Amino acid sequence: MKPALLLVLVVGILVGCEGIGQGMKPMDGNGGTTRSPDAGVNQNEDVIYTHGRVQNVGKLDEFMGRGSGQLRIVHYTVEGDPIFNDLSYENERVKVRRDNTQDRFGTPRVVVYSCNKLNKEETDTQMLFTLSGCDGEAEKVPLFRVSYDVGQQDTFEFDLRYGVQRKNVIDTFQNRLVKDLIIAGTAEVNDFKLTPKERQTIYKAMVLANYLEPKELSLACNVKPHGSYDLRVRINDAEHQYQWSQCDQGRDGLDMLEVANTIIEVVQARKDYQELPPAEGGYH
């Protein structure tokens, strides 16, 4: 059996003791105008890597899309100490400021590197961010890697129930697909089974939502009627369950809603789902 940590999210971030700084020439030790370590960690805005799990990886995409501003990547050591990697665009180059002065077991140092470009390489099973054209000997430096290869998992199953009364069911444990027809009851697909490609798409969405981290979710909702979600996931020998309503606008609620929508979109695009009868009426 593979270790649970690697089974769910294998993330290679190379901004700690290796990666950034290896083979690149330091510019100075002051770091310019990027955020100070005293500013701490912003749980909503910073990319945070903690012992094999990543949070807010989408912020790196946004940073690349803007081509301006700053972004902090925080790498926690095994002992729980933060190493700050501040990226900023300056004069059409990417500056990287690495500060490990809060690492109690490292050699305190602040160094700054300059690179021509921040790159993203994405496949069906992984996402890799690199820096290229860097000062010094290293032409291409790995920055951040997220792996979401469902084929590497021993077990990956889930059961999603959703809707006003959660009568819609997408259950890979029992190979069940149930559609809520409202007035007309329900309709079911026999021998429902996702393809490997569909499973890969769904697993990727879960990994990018950092679904193993504790979630603050809410079932509260003042809208009547309102939909809600119940998602149970088994990854190898671990099982996790999440419940939230359509009214949950918190960060975790929106992340899990994106996961649920990915599952629903994948299934609704299938021929066997499209052959089910349409729903009739509505909830009041």
Image (cartoon, rainbow, N blue to C red):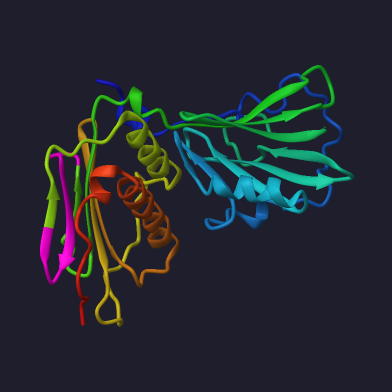
What residue is drawn where x is 34% and y is 23%?
Answer: 152
What residue is drawn where x is 25% and y is 24%?
Answer: 154
What residue is drawn where x is 57% and y is 46%?
Answer: 47
Where does the C terminus fall, quadrant-wise? bottom left
Tell me how many marks there are: 0
Magenta residue span: 172-186
Looking at the picture, does residue 210 appear above or below residue 40? Answer: above
- In terms of image quadrants, where is residue 217? bottom left
Q: Is 124 in front, or is 53? A: 124
Looking at the picture, does residue 251 appear above or below residue 283? Answer: above
What residue is drawn where x is 44% and y is 33%?
Answer: 52
Where does the N terminus fall, quadrant-wise? top left
Q: Is residue 164 left or right of residue 208?
A: left
Residue 115: x, y in percent?
Answer: 81, 32
Residue 68: x, y in percent?
Answer: 78, 52
Looking at the picture, does residue 150 appear above or below residue 232? Answer: above
Q: Is 90 in front, or is 265? A: 265
Can residue 16 be seen from the camera position used here?
Answer: yes
Residue 51: x, y in percent?
Answer: 45, 35
Q: Residue furthest right?
A: 91
State the predominant SS element of the stretch in magenta: strand
Q: Is residue 48 left or right of residue 73?
A: left
Q: Is 15 in front, or is 149? A: 149
Looking at the picture, does residue 248 appear above or below residue 270? Answer: below
Residue 57: x, y in percent?
Answer: 54, 45
Can residue 109 be seen from the camera position used here?
Answer: no
Residue 207, magenta (yes or no): no
